[in-house]
Image (tube, rainbow, N blue to C red):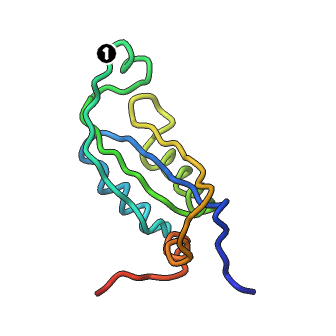
Amino acid sequence: MENKCVPGKIKTLVTIIDRGRGEKLAELFRENKVAYNMMLLGKGTAKSEMLDYLGLGRTEKDIIISVGNEENIKIILNELKEKFNLSEPGNGIAFTIPVSSIDSALALEYICGLTDNRKE
């Protein structure tokens, strides 16, 4: 049976976690075949009441934007709860956004882990 990836099964995962923990997250993502990860440095500007409500203590954050297939993202979300305690307030937040289309078959294959275009 041919291993095929469906664009409707692709998700963008956004994870916001305390500064300095992003590299460990990206490593976890790569171990789970999520090949595309972009890490950004974030700094919150919300009022302290809003931070308390959301359970976000420190304002300096690592923001990791990842794209992968739905099955791998589900595994990662479960591991985030277990290994990074994201289900506990103040440890970060993760959410997904569905991807409805991708304009390149090669990009789709790369995101799904069907090809590896990295040069050695």
Q: What element carries label 1?
A: loop
Quadrant assignment, res 58: top left
Q: Which residue is drawn at 67% across and 68% down?
A: 6
Which residue in the protein does label 1 denote? 47
Q: In this view, does 16 lie above or below 100?
A: above
Left or right: 67 as drawn, with respect to 38? right
At x 42%, y 65%, the residue is 36
Taking the spot 47% from the left edge, 32% from the top edge, the residue there is 88
- The residue that appears at 25% across and 33% down in the rendered structure is 43
Q: How many marks on residues?
A: 1
Quarter of the C terminus within the rendering: bottom left
- Front-lying residue, 22 or 98: 98
Q: Where is residue 73 in the image (x, y as percent from the top left)?
A: 56, 57
- Residue, far top: 49
Horizontal and vertical percent position of residue 55: 41, 24
- Farthest-out residue, right: 1
**Residue 102 at what x, y percent from top left?**
56, 64
Q: In x, y percent, where is residue 114? A: 55, 80
The crowding category of the residue bearing disc 1, from other C-alpha atoms within 10 Å (few below 14, some 14 to 19, many at least 20), is few
State whether residue 39 is above or below residue 45.
below
Q: Which of 53 and 6 is in front in this view?
A: 6
In the current view of this chain or complex, which residue is farthest to the front?
A: 103
Image side of residue 10 versus residue 115, left or right: right
User: Looking at the rendering, which quadrant does residue 101 occupy?
Assistant: bottom right
Please name the amino acid that badge 1 sits on: Lys
Q: Where, quadrant-wise, is the N terminus in this rendering?
A: bottom right
